[in-house]
Image (cartoon, rainbow, N blue to C red):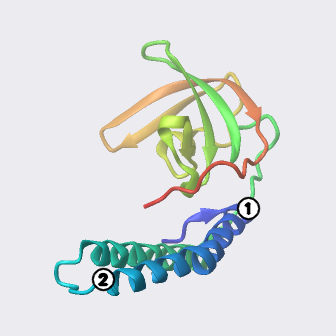
């Protein structure tokens, strides 16, 4: 795994684990207990649904604990005017002149539909450390790449409200 995460990411994951252990786990166990009391378990949909919910919660707890255990803690070490972690970068695609804005985030906060791209993605790797006005080549794979021009780099404070991705 070895995801590159910030201290803020770790804190948010620990809070979710605590909530799942203290609140969600109790609710799940109570739901299983109530469904079991209804009788025949082989045809009891509520029982099977409650067990599934309980197992999903336990799986999420294990997943988050494993992420924390194997995480590599990082901080943004780029200059203020360079693309880097938690910065919003506006780029223009050389091929067609269109522009896009991306916020560079850690892997667990990645959400391309919201303009949040992982620092592990090819475009982010290409952008990191570069400044406004620079043309950068993004190599997607062995046979495909494209060029972008960095239009602007904005410092954006770390945003704890960005949800941690669910799997």
Looking at the rendering, in which quadrant would you find the C terminus?
bottom left
Q: Position of residue 125 (x, y in %)?
A: 55, 46
Q: Quadrant of residue 6?
A: bottom right
Q: How much space separates mark 1 and mark 2, taking CA atoms?
A: 44 Å
**Category of crowding for the residue at label 1, using alpha-carbon neighbours closer than 10 angstroms: few (below 14), some (14–19), many (at least 20):** few
**Side of 151 relative to 56 (left or right):** right
On residue 19, the disc is none
For label 1, the residue is: 8
Q: Secondary structure at mark 2?
A: loop
Q: Nearer the viewer, residue 146 or 71?
A: 71
What residue is drawn where x is 49% and y is 18%?
A: 94
Q: Nearer the viewer, residue 98 or 82?
A: 98
Q: Is label 1 or label 2 in front? A: 2
Q: Quadrant of residue 38?
A: bottom left
What residue is drawn where x is 74% and y is 37%?
A: 82
Q: Position of residue 142 (x, y in %)?
A: 33, 44
What residue is drawn where x is 72% and y is 52%?
A: 160
**Side of 98 relative to 56 (left or right):** right
On residue 38, the disc is 2
Q: Are marks 1 and 2 in contact (CB under 8 Å)?
A: no
Q: Position of residue 95 (x, y in %)?
A: 43, 16
**Category of crowding for the residue at label 2, using alpha-carbon neighbours closer than 10 angstroms: few (below 14), some (14–19), many (at least 20):** few
Taking the view exactly as shown, the residue that stands out farthest to the front is 38
What residue is drawn where x is 71% and y is 39%?
A: 87
């Amino acid at each position: 795994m070895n995801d590159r995460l910030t201290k803020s990411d770790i804190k948010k994951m620990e809070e979710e684990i605590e909530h799942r252990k203290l609140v969600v786990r109790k609710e799940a166990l109570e739901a299983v207990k109530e469904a079991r009391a209804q009788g025949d378990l082989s045809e009891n949909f509520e029982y099977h649904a409650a067990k599934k919910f309980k197992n999903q919660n336990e799986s999420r707890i294990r997943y988050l604990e494993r992420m924390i255990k194997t995480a590599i803690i990082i901080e943004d070490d780029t200059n203020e005017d360079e693309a880097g972690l938690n910065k919003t970068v506006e780029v223009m695609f050389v091929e067609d002149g269109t522009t896009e804005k991306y916020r560079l985030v850690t892997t667990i906060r990645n959400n391309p539909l919201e303009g949040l791209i992982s620092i592990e993605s090819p475009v982010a790797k290409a952008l990191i450390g570069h400044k406004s006005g620079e043309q950068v080549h993004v190599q997607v794979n062995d046979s495909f790449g494209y060029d972008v021009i960095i239009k602007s780099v904005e410092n954006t404070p770390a945003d704890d409200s960005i949800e941690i991705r669910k799997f």
